[in-house]
Amino acid sequence: MTSSGRFDAARRRLAEWGRPITLDSLSDVIERGSVLPPAPDFEATSDDDRPATLLYTSGSTGTPKGAVLTHKLIRYLWTEYWPYARGLPIIGINYLPMSHAVGRAVLMETLVSGGVGYFAARSDLSTLLEDIALVRPTELLVVPRVCEMLLQLYQGELDRRSRMVGVDEDEVQAELRERVLAGRVVRAGTTSAPLADDTAEFIQSCLEVPLRDGYGSTEAGRVMYDGHISRPPESPTSSSTFPNSATSALTSRTREVSF
């Protein structure tokens, strides 16, 4: 059956099932649009309100849609979505899709701060741990799936050494931090979905830096940060996102970083 035949068959099935869904072919949409009057120019009250880009979302706030992001929101995504400490030399690993608001925010934040961003070799994350070891990031954003990968690797190593007398869990964590995560992470966060408390505790213990938690949507930007609802114009300061307890980690882990 040709594409046209399958399209017509789908239309008939929808009609037979009584579904209130209309299927239009791209050519029909283009033909209808060609006779419409030109769309009016957008007139904003300020430059901040002008549309900057269209980013498609899976539908955090409803059905999938193209979310119109204004210049104001884009600037926010680039500089404040995931607040960072001024002066931190950001070296990041990018593996989230660029169609994801967080994926873009992480990359843009790195570039805006004058840092260096690397991309994972494969989109299926099959080489992600090897990529992290090569990049040696100073900043690491982990989604629950990546946290599970690290936890499984840790538990597997513990099982392998279980026949050894006096296996040291702290030693295994240290090896994971230095060998897999390259021992240079001074800022870490998690996003996209809730993280189990025990998993979050493990990741934070392994990295030896606070694990920040963020939640948001493509349409609205960041909604919550570390359990606190974001209420503009307030935003976390550098001191709240990069506490004094991490100062020694910054000094020792980024001593050799230069651009």
Image (cartoon, rainbow, N blue to C red):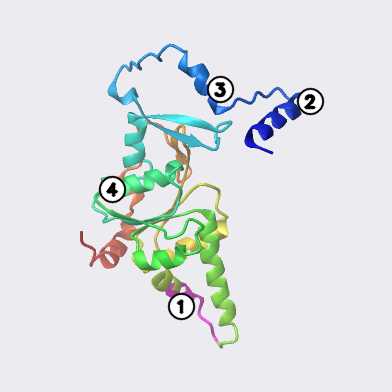
**Residue reaching furthest top?**
37
Corner quadrant of residue 48: top left
> Nearer the observer, disc 4 or disc 2?
2
**Residue reaching furthest left?**
259
Callout 2 environment at 10 Å: few (<14), some (14 to 19), or many (20+)? few
The reply to whether the C-beta atoms of the residues labelled 4 and 1 are less than 8 Å apart is no
- Mark 1 or mark 3, which has the lower sequence index? 3
Residue 119: x and y in percent read 38, 56
> Nearer the observer, disc 4 or disc 3?
3
Q: Which numbered marker is on residue 10?
A: none
Q: Mark 1: which amino acid?
A: Glu
Residue 132: x and y in percent read 40, 64
- Mark 4 or mark 3, which has the lower sequence index? 3
SS at circle 4: helix
Is 45 situated left or right of 95 in this image? left
Residue 56: x and y in percent read 48, 35
- Between the C-alphas of marks 4 and 1, the distance is 35 Å
The magenta stretch is 166-175
The answer to whether residue 14 of the structure is visible from this angle is yes
SS at circle 3: helix
Callout 3 environment at 10 Å: few (<14), some (14 to 19), or many (20+)? few
Q: Mark 4: which amino acid?
A: Leu
Residue that numbered label 3 is attached to: 28
- Mark 1 or mark 2, which has the lower sequence index? 2
**Along the line of sight, the residue nearer the viewer: 197 or 35:** 35
